[in-house]
Amino acid sequence: MRKNLTLSLILVLLISLIFSVNLFAQEKGGTLRYAMIDTPPSLDQQVVTSDLATIIAQHIFEGLYTFNSQYAPVPMLAEGSMVKEDGRLVTINLRQGVTFHNGKEMTSEDVVASLKRWGEFGVRGPVLFNYIEAVEANGSYAVDLHFSEPFSAWQSMLAFINGGPVILPSEIMENADERPISPEDYIGTGPYEFTRWDTGRFIQLSRYEDYAARSDQADGYGGERIAYFDELRFIPVSEVGTRINGLRAGDYDYAESMQGDLYEDLKADDRVNVLVNQGAQFGEVFFNQKQGIMTNKKLRQAILAAVDMEPVMQAAHGHPDLWDLNGSIMPEKTIWYSEAAIEKYSRGDAELARKLAEEAGYNGERIRYMATTSYQTMYDSSVVIAQQLSEAGFNIDLQIYDWATLASRRNDPEVWDLFYTWHGFVPDPILYTFLSPTYPGWWDTAKKRLLVNNFTQAMEQEERVEIWSELQEEIYDHVPILKTGDNYTYDIVVPEVKGFGETSLIWPKFWNIWFE
């Protein structure tokens, strides 16, 4: 009996010790100092798409929806929604008891005013509002979206905070236009509130003590948000070496945008932890489908067959932790990942390329390939791709321009056949530029229009995923672009900052993060 009692007491003490350690580990307090590459132009998320702005503003402002760790849209300020009239009416129910940083409760009046300003003046708003006929309050805690036709990506559009529809008080939104609002109007519902902008020195946020957190489990940007830090201070530090040395010296706790060639040294440094960003970017070669030699689909297929992407990614991005040979257009950790037709990716088959080129009737005509030296990774990728194409028998004229010149020339279908660019991470494929028939490359076929139309009108997520796989298969058959592979940026953080895994989200966030 005494032995059992002793064991029970030891067990209770161990549980108490573990519990107290966890409480201590996640104790509130301190100022997180973030060294960023520059100062954003504004924190007004509705009209500014700067990543620098989003990193800060996401702590102040919230939208009706956000994204979980798989980048599926989930409710944030919304409680839920109902889709009616075959997708032409969406009723969004709002969470009650959510307050702005000025103490006012958020209601449908604020949501309607915010959505209307974003729809008229926001950077991304017109994409959604092309399908919306009216936005109306439905009582104090619900909003009706009236669509001219079904548009299945409405949740993703409402969830994408970068240039997105964050919710502010109606009295601010009703007087706002395309110009960024003033800092005194940075009033949101987030876990931190704006407190100070010392120009050239720092932007400061403080914990909002009356924050109305969600009760569901934290997942990606979704779920419960706890502000452990007393303050967040975002400090512009332009030089990467200064950001690194400042973090090592204890001047900063987090530093963004490290260089690829420093990766191994920083990984070996026990004074820092390396965080690789999950938001995969990818390089892409566009084909001119409006005019010239690349209007020949068989020839585009020949070029696709010729390129081995592994040496391309090695040359451009270095350490293998910073890139993946991924033939899926969307990254593997997203709900959109698909293996449809990826056997055609990165074949590096010069013999097959020559065979397809012969079938296309190619006779060594000059192929004008525009690349830029403004971005080193773009140039390095293009050099390797051009070399492989030349070795496979294509007459490649690699033309090098600064980015501004290339961006101007690509609008003229008479002067190019291929050009190289890159695409940042998007949480929904509908946001890819190559799906637009007006984007240089001008992909606009009957089959593509049908698939895109089906994709935007399908209201169930499972059906949208299936249609996206069909679209990916069509991409590999029609070949509007070549995808090189996924690549990742990375940041560093002091070991005392806890709550991160080995990776960060698209924009690093500092709720549910604490000092040890």
Image (cartoon, rainbow, N blue to C red):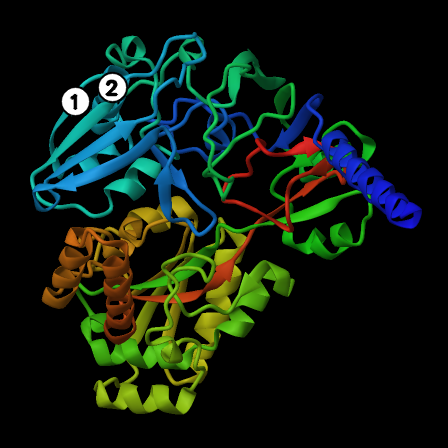
x and y, in percent, of residue 501 in the image: 64, 48
Name the residue located 55 percent from the left edge and 11 percent from the top edge. 195
Name the residue located 34 percent from the left edge and 77 percent from the top edge. 303
Q: Which mark is residue 59?
A: none
Q: Can residue 235 be seen here? A: yes
Q: Amino acid at mark 1?
A: Asn
The residue that label 2 is drawn on is 108
Q: Quadrant of residue 500?
A: top right
The residue that label 1 is drawn on is 138
Which residue occupies the foreground of this view, 464 or 91?
91
Against 210, is 413 above or below? below
Which quadrant, please, contains the C terminus?
A: top right
Against 449, is 86 above or below? above
| Contact? badges 1 and 2 (CB < 8 Å) | yes
x and y, in percent, of residue 196 in the image: 56, 11
Which residue occupies the foreground of this view, 222 or 450?
222
Against 431, is 139 above or below? above
**Left or right of residue 54, residue 119 in this image:** left
